[in-house]
């Protein structure tokens, strides 16, 4: 770290070409390490679920509708309780 | 184009890097995921405007960046949240020494102007070409190049050059002391 500091100090200020290559390599490494830590977490379920739901709007409607009415063929069911 | 299975898979495949970009921009894990969610909703709602064969990640990054920009204008950065929440989003906590170095880096990155920070991240971490980064940011390729260069110079100065003469009192020391400088 100390070496890097003193070397950078000797570099001409304000010139990109003058920046120490080792420092630039470190910056690049740190940047990617930070970024890749998140990338490695993959896709959280939250987003998989979101895409799946949005992907099948018709299926979603069907599910909603199904709850309301059962099979309607008979209408009035046979009420043959046989009450005596 | 219509949302095909393949396209849906490609969008999902872009989510990890969208999150990484969002966290880099916002410095806040929870907000970053909200930003990614908004991006996906916006993308799916406008999927017809996506040109088949063009760069899907670049398209998604453009949406995310624009959302962040408009959001940013509204409520500004919640600076005090930046470090703690970012560290929480990491699965594995870095070791003590690495953690300190990581926080220093994160803090230095936060000091960059937003234009420079996003350009550096797009080119240096996301791996976009200068051309793609320029498309995402809606500016010229030369502008991206100079932003990246300035970002690198400034990070180098913040991290590896003694700040005393050129950059005022050392921020880290001040933070440790806890003064309200």
Image (cartoon, coloured by chain):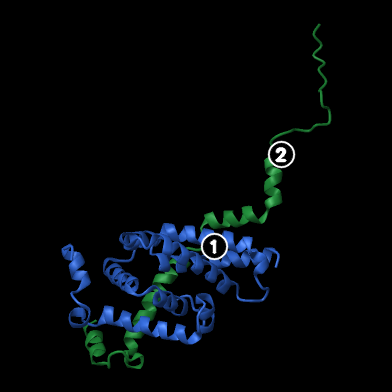
* Colour representing chain B: blue
SS of the residue at dot 1?
helix
Chain ID at mark 1: B
**Image coords of residue B160 (percent x, y):** 26, 81
Picture residue at 48% right of the left edge, 61% below the top: B35
Q: Quadrant of residue B46?
A: bottom right
List x then y, in percent, for residue B115.
41, 76
Q: Residue furthest front?
A: B74
Residue position for label 1: B39
Residue where numbered disc 2 is placed: A66
Task: Specify whether B47 is left or right of B134.
Answer: right
Q: Is residue B134 left or right of residue B167?
A: right
Q: Give the chain ID for the green colour.
A: A
Residues tagged by mark 2 and mark 1 found on one chain of the structure: no
Classify 10 Å Cα crowding around label 2: few (below 14), some (14-19), many (20 and above). Answer: few
Quarter of the view holding residue B73? bottom left
Residue at point 44%, 78% (across, down): B119
Q: How far apart are marks 2 and 1 (CA)?
A: 31 Å
């Amino acid at each position: 770290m100390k070496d890097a500091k003193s070397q950078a100090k000797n570099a001409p200020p304000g010139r990109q070409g003058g920046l120490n290559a080792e420092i630039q390599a470190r910056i690049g490494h740190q940047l990617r390490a930070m970024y890749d830590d998140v990338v490695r977490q993959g896709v959280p379920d939250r987003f998989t679920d979101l895409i799946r739901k949005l992907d099948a709007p018709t299926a979603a409607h069907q599910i909603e509708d199904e709850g309301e009415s059962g099979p309607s063929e008979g209408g009035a069911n046979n009420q043959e309780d046989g009450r005596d | 184009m219509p949302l095909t299975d393949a396209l849906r898979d490609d969008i999902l495949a872009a989510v990890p890097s969208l999150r990484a970009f969002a966290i880099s921009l916002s410095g806040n894990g929870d907000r970053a995921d909200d930003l990614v969610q908004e991006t996906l909703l916006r993308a799916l709602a406008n999927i017809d405007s996506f040109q088949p064969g063009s760069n899907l990640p670049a398209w998604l990054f453009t949406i995310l960046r624009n959302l962040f920009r408009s959001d940013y204008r509204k409520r500004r950065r919640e600076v005090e949240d930046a470090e703690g929440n970012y560290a929480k989003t990491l699965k594995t906590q870095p070791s003590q020494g690495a953690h300190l170095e990581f926080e220093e880096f994160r803090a230095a990155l936060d000091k960059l102007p937003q234009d420079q920070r996003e350009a550096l991240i797009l080119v240096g971490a996301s791996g976009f070409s200068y051309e793609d980064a320029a498309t995402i940011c809606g500016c010229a390729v030369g502008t991206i190049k100079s932003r990246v260069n300035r970002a690198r110079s400034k990070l180098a100065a913040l991290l590896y050059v003694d700040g005393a003469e050129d950059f005022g009192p050392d921020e880290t020391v001040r933070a440790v002391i806890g003064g309200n400088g």
